[in-house]
Every structure is written in C-alpha cells, then in structure tokens.
Amino acid sequence: MAEQRIVLVDSDAVSRKNLKSMLTKLGYWVVGETGDGLNALKMVRTRQPELVILDSAIVGMDGFEVAKIIHEDKLAPVVVLTAAYTQAMVERAKEARISALLTKPVDEAGILPAIELALATYGEVVQLEGKLKELKELLETRKLLEKAKGIMMETMGLSEAEAFRRMQKQSMNKRISMRQVAEAVILAQNLKE
C-alpha cells in the first residue's frame, strides 16, 4: 500500500485526532484536517488528496452536501462517518455518491477495507471516464473524416481511397492531425456555400 493522502473532516477534535492516529498507523498520510464543510472544500481543492473522510454532521455545511460537491467536481472518493444511520441517510449517501458509510466509532478492521475499496473503485471510475472521453473523441474524428472524404469525393471526383490518401498526405506534409485536415476541408466547403 502506497502512502495515500487523506483529508479528515470532523467537528469533534478528539475524534479527528484518534482517527488521524489510526490512519497514520495504517500507513496513510493525513495532509489536512478541519471541522467544517467550507474549509474542507478549500482544503480538498488545494491539497488534492486521494481520499476524503468526513463526518456527516460537520459545521457549516452538511457532510453529504460536501461529499456531493467533491463527487461532482471529481476531486476524490469520499468515506462518510456517522453516529448512527437510517434508511434516509443511506438514500442521501447514494445521492451524494459516497464510496462508503461507516458508523462511529470506527476501528482499523472497519476503516481499512472501506478506504481500500473506495480508492480502487474510484480509480476504476476515473480510468473508465478517460476511456469514454477517448472513444467519444475518436468517434467524432471518424465522423469528421467521413464527412471530409464525402466532400472531396463529390467536389473533386475522387474515390474514397483517393480522398483518404490525399488527406493523409496533407496530414503528413503539414504535420497536423487527420482531424485537423478534415476540419479544414469541411470549413473550406462551408465557406464556398
């Protein structure tokens, strides 16, 4: 286990101190701690931790509100601690997209798997989002290339293979991407119309 960076958010200073001690003993690095929601958001944005552990009842903002903002801004996975939980709290946890909901007091046996699973799941989600973005860009490029080939075939009387080869040659000669060549062909056609 690498030394993962964690921000702790709990209004109870004693609870925060005990949790920090436990996390340090487990090999995690607590890079910030606070007792209120607004400072928690500022701290998460500046210190960029791999994980945020926060109490559901913190000063200023509700813990679930803070967790939801952290999730929406894709800052880090969140583990929420609570004195006791109800079904309504579980629903709020789902809405906030938290990684784990643990009841206080937490112990090493309970928090360690929650942290490890939160980190692993969040890593997979980030990786999948990156692949999705990459595939969307690839699909958009493919559409532009097809449109540009169609324009060249129609205006220059070229076959599909010849149109593709010309765009490929322009791409290599100008040292620009095929997408940029396709965009230029489409733009030139749009200017003629």
Image (tube, grey):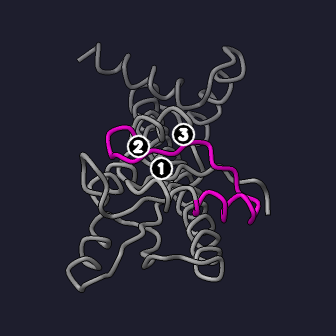
Tell how many labels: 3
Disc nearest the viewer among 3 and 2: 2
Q: Name the residue tied to disc 2.
A: 40
In the image, residue 115 lies at what x, y percent?
Answer: 60, 69
Q: Secondary structure at mark 2?
A: helix
Classify residue 64 by image quadrant: bottom left
In the depicted view, which residue is nearer to us: 161 or 71?
A: 71
Of mark 3 and mark 2, the one earlier in the sequence is 2
- Residue at figure coordinates x 61%, y 64% from the top left: 119
Q: Are marks 2 and 1 in contact (CB under 8 Å)?
A: no
Q: Is residue 23 above or below residue 93?
A: above
Q: Which residue ends up furthest to the left in the rendered image?
A: 88
Residue beneath the point at 65% across and 74% down: 112
Neighbours of disc 1 within 10 Å: few (<14), some (14-19), many (20+): few
Callout 1, which amino acid? Leu
Lower sequence index among marks 2 and 1: 2
Label 2 sits on what residue type?
A: Ala
Front residue of 59 and 191: 59
Amino acid at circle 3: Ser
Query: Mark 3 — residue?
Result: 159
SS type, badge 1? helix
Q: Which residue is label 1 attached to? A: 139
**What span is in magenta?**
18-39
User: Image check: 142 left or right of 115?
Assistant: left
Quadrant occupied by the N terminus: bottom right
Position of 109 with respect to 80 (left or right) is right
- In percent of width and height, residue 81 lies at 42, 69
Between 172 and 166, the one nearer to me in the picture: 172
Residue that lies at the very extreme toward the front in this rendered image: 14
